[in-house]
Image: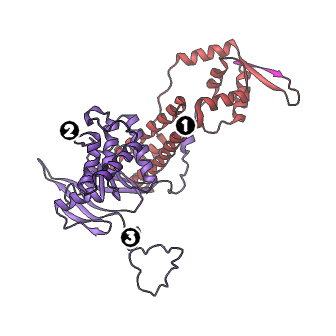
Chain colours: A red, B purple
Amino acid sequence: MRLPLLALLARGSAHGYELKQDLEQLLGAAYPQPNVGQIYVTLGRLEKSGLIEGEEVEQASRPNKKIYHLTDAGREALRAWYEETADEPRVRDEFFMKLALAPQTGLADQIALINKQRRQYLNTMRELSKLAATENRDNRISQLLIEGAMLHLQADLDWLERCQEELEELE
Amino acid sequence: MSRTPPRPRAENPPRPASSAPPAQDSRDTPVLRAKDLVKTHHGEGAPARAVRGVDLSVRRGEFVAVTGPSGAGKSTLLHLLGGLQRQDSGSIWLDGMCTDRFSEARWATERRRRIGIVFQFFNLVSNLSVADNVELPALLAGVSPKQARAEREQLLDELGLQGKERSMPGELSGGEQQRVALARALVNHPPLLLADEPAGSLDSKGTREVTRLLTRFHQRGQTILLVTHDARLASAADRVISFFDGRIADDAELDRVPPRGTGLGISGVLELKD
């Protein structure tokens, strides 16, 4: 979450709780339970590495809050982030290794493994559909994030189908 | 499956085990049941065994999706269940009634009364208006023109097609045509809706629309059997049957599967990683 937080600070300074709210507003229901503790920890690390600076602000009847802003190094890190392309998503390697090794262990049937995995993906797909239906339609970023997750899952399901076709032929 | 006794109702305390078996409650009879269905296509080349011994039962109010790779035989299965093709062997029951001796004409009647069907390519009558496409099956079923019109108006409103009554199918988008096809399939309130790749020729937006509408009709009690290769559409169903090589490979009720092990669910697939 380091770089997204830097990106949120590019606009101007903010404190931890504001950043959590910004993320919630941007990603809507698609953002699973933003954890404010995690945000504070990440901000602490970013400060240590000199990418942001915090300033204590006194509050009348509450503990001090810390307002953060980007440093030049932080802005540079952000610029570099935008220069790079992101890594490709990975094939589920843990499941694939399970499937590939199943016959040698004699502990699991490949088709049963595929069926079990498919059930799980379908349930997650169903939850995503429900989430998309309840999430505000006008929040395009949130809808796109959910749709992206669904398309990835669809690809995984298609791939399970291919595995099943190939492996059933062998039986 | 159809032998299970009816659930006792409040005013109807359970009978002692010794009494005669209770009369079959029609609500517990499967809307659709198939046993040992087999269908082989004899075209050029080797015979293709499209359906190889399928047992299936669909309860009232269920929403079942059949998924699988293309060529697995799932469309053939749906065609058998709707009487559009005849099985080589095995039997099909509609509402507990065996269809083995049904003539083509009888199947055609059932497809107006008991079974509504939507297809991938909509199959609307191209030289009839939207209104006439929807009213036609009602009129053929003997409904009065006034009633047919009222049904059509209500369905088109519900499907967001107000103002399209006089359009011809060719003037509509794919998504709109599929909605007209859905209205046509439901105009006679059939107990069972069969859908053969209903989103197969629609874009992502059209797919979402069809998913949403099927979900809505299901929530009101419509029994649906859907054939699709689209997992997003399939996951709207509460039961998903995986079909491979003419056979049922898995039959899973969604949301009722044992705990998902180490799966992370939606937060796992949506989480932003550091």
Outermost residue, right side: A61
Question: Does A52 lie within the magenta span?
Answer: yes
Distance in Å between CA atoms under marks 3 and 2: 40 Å
Q: Is residue B110 visible?
A: yes
Distance in Å between CA atoms under marks 3 and 1: 44 Å
Find disc 1 in the rendering and name its residue.
B270
Question: Does A71 lie within the magenta span?
Answer: no
Find disc 3 in the rendering and name its residue.
B26
**Element type at mark 3:** helix
Q: Nearer the viewer, residue B227 or B168?
A: B168
Chain for disc number 1: B
A113 to the left or right of B268: left
Identified by mark 2, the residue type is: Asn
**Element type at mark 2:** loop
Q: Residues within 10 Å of mark 1 (few under 14, many from 20)?
A: some
Chain for disc number 2: B
Q: Residues within 10 Å of mark 2 (few under 14, many from 20)?
A: few
Find disc 2 in the rendering and name its residue.
B127
Residues rendered magenta in the picture: A51-58
Of label 3 and label 2, which has the lower sequence position?
3
Distance in Å between CA atoms under marks 2 and 1: 47 Å
Identified by mark 3, the residue type is: Ser
Q: Nearer the viewer, residue B2 or B210?
A: B210
Instruction: Give x and y (percent) for residue B49.
Output: 21, 54
Q: Nearer the viewer, residue A99 or B180?
A: B180
Identified by mark 1, the residue type is: Leu
Please name the residue shown 41% across and 85% down the image: B20
Look at discs 3 and 1 and give the one toward the viewer.
3
Instruction: Give x and y (percent) for residue A60.
Output: 88, 27
Look at discs 3 and 2 and give the one toward the viewer.
2
